[in-house]
Image (cartoon, rainbow, N blue to C red):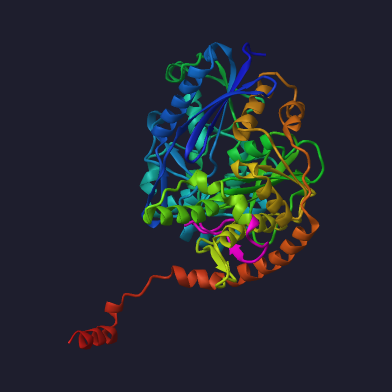
Amino acid sequence: MSNGDIILGIDSGTSVVKAVAFSLQGEQLGCASVRNRYQRGAGGAAQQSLSQTWQDATRAVQQLAETLPQLAARTAAIAVTGQGDGSWLVGANNQPVGEAWIWLDARAAPTVKALGESPLARARFEATGTGLNTCQQGAQLAHMDRHCPARLDCSEVALHCKDWLYLNLTGVRATDPSEASFTFGNFRHQRYDDTVIDALGLRHRRHLLPEIVEGTRTTHPLTAAAARATGLRAGTPVSLGYVDMAMTALGAGVQTGDVNTACSIVGSTGVHMRAVAIDQVYLNQTQTGYVIPLPWPGCVTQVQTNMASTLNLDWVLGMAEKLIVEFGGEADHARLVGHLNRWLDESQPGALLYHPYISEAGERGPFVNADARASFVGLCYGHGFGDLVRAVIEGIGLSARDCYQAMGGLPGELRLSGGAVRSARLRQILGACVGVPVRSSRREEAGAAGAAMMAAVAIGVYPSMAHCVSDWVTPLLDAVETPPAPLVARYQTLYDSYQLTRQALPPVWQQLRAPFPNPHDDPAVVGRSAVHKE
């Protein structure tokens, strides 16, 4: 076992990089965060700077050291996780090849559609357990290979976000079993799979795939350069965590040894996961969702993810904030959030139906459609703003239920994580929409904790993840909250309507996304305009 009484977890999200210190027994001792921005561009582009992400990670560690005395000397191990999917390309001398295409990038949509019609599409899904969508590195590399091959020609390795940070920390080009298997591999043996690579048309790019490292068994030492950048000690063991979805779910209680439990991470996006044995994986006919291994022998998570979860709530509250300000009032997001309970009290359950597909990239769970868009159904003159807010929250809950149904059925108990679930009213609505009891975790930084738990096992603090979970996770789960039976029944009826309208809307979404005709291209319209002007 290494010396020191702190395990440092680094979690690089889409917009925030966090450095979190934990005791060896799982107590959170401190946290520092740095904003990490991304840029949107034409054609659905969403990109992030590799060099800036590394700089932001080092700043977060430095800021943590300012609040925790002797952080460098006390750190027994470092663990790293980060946002999933996306393509972080690295070339000669470990330098970035352009900016990363992150998971929000939608440019690969036409390639995803073409690959979905391939004779190997089902074989790829059977191996990975994961539906192909624009977020994934496999789809993005296939799109680059077709439309900008020079970018790949200049690359030596294709990494994910956490892998890029691991490279900067250790000098080792590697990825973990979770992202490797759901992108290019097989969830059963958690190694690369030639059938999957061929299905993506990337056999000639196989050399871009990095070594797969299991972070509970293998660590690499912090390099001297990384030590100078972070202020930590060279030689400190570094563990490569799994993708942030798996780490957050692990930290929040997706796998505690209990039967038929699940975990929903209710953040900007919605991540819905259930832990199952490898031989119990349910592969649906629509070829959607993910199968993501856990650092727990014989166990994987089945996952369905919404492109937008609380982003829908941010949108509706943001509209109110903007309107208030435009008319000379004062409003901010925090004050509006404080009114949520009042709006919920003033509205009736199920008065409106809302589909929460607010993301410009469409939806990826439990169906893949880049054209998908949000909508209210059932509006009438008597509805007020509170009804809209409640409908949005109910839509978030119904989309979670939709995801669990696509995984083979509802869980027996749902563990909740994310900032939104601090609200008891929101937890009640989410539980009633899914139709199961819920428990929330008091773990503040579940993603960093999940990665730190892997490091704790790697350096011998615990003999297994099961032993670590019993100290780090189970004691932080709150009591079971059972939603009221009448509310569950109301949302069951609403869910039937939710599914019916969701299945009918794709032709409408497609038509709305079609290019709007220019009236000046129509001679008849131009002629009428000319007559009117005269």
Question: Residue 177, percent across and down?
Answer: 62, 37
What kind of secondary structure does the magenta stretch mostly adopt?
loop
**Quadrant of the drawing holding the N terminus:** top right
Position of residue 396 measured from the top left corner of the image (x, y, whole percent): 62, 55
Classify 23 as above or below 213. Answer: above
Farthest left residue?
Answer: 534
Frontmost residue, 132 versus 260: 260
Q: Check residue 350 for magenta coloring.
A: yes
User: Which residue is pictured at 47% across the width and 22% down the height?
Assistant: 63
Q: Residue at x 28, y 84 (%)?
A: 525
- In reply to whether residue 317 is colored magenta, the answer given is no
Q: Is residue 350 visible?
A: yes
The residue lying toward the viewer, choosing from 248 and 216, is 248
Left or right, 95 with respect to 196, comes to: left
Q: Is residue 268 visible to us here?
A: no
Locate residue 314 relative to residue 452 in the image: left or right: left
Expressed as whole percent of the image width and height from the top left, the position of residue 428 reads 71, 50
Quarter of the rendering containing residue 116: bottom right
Q: Which residues are magenta?
A: 345-365
The correct choice, above or below, for 376 with respect to 300 in the image is below
Q: Position of residue 248 (x, y in %)?
A: 63, 37
Residue positioned most to the front: 329
Q: How many marks?
A: 0
**Quadrant of the rendered structure where residue 353 is?**
bottom right
Q: Nearer the viewer, residue 531 or 208?
A: 531
Residue placed farthest to the right in the image?
A: 259
Above/below status of 327 relative to 299: below
- Quadrant of the image for the C terminus? bottom left
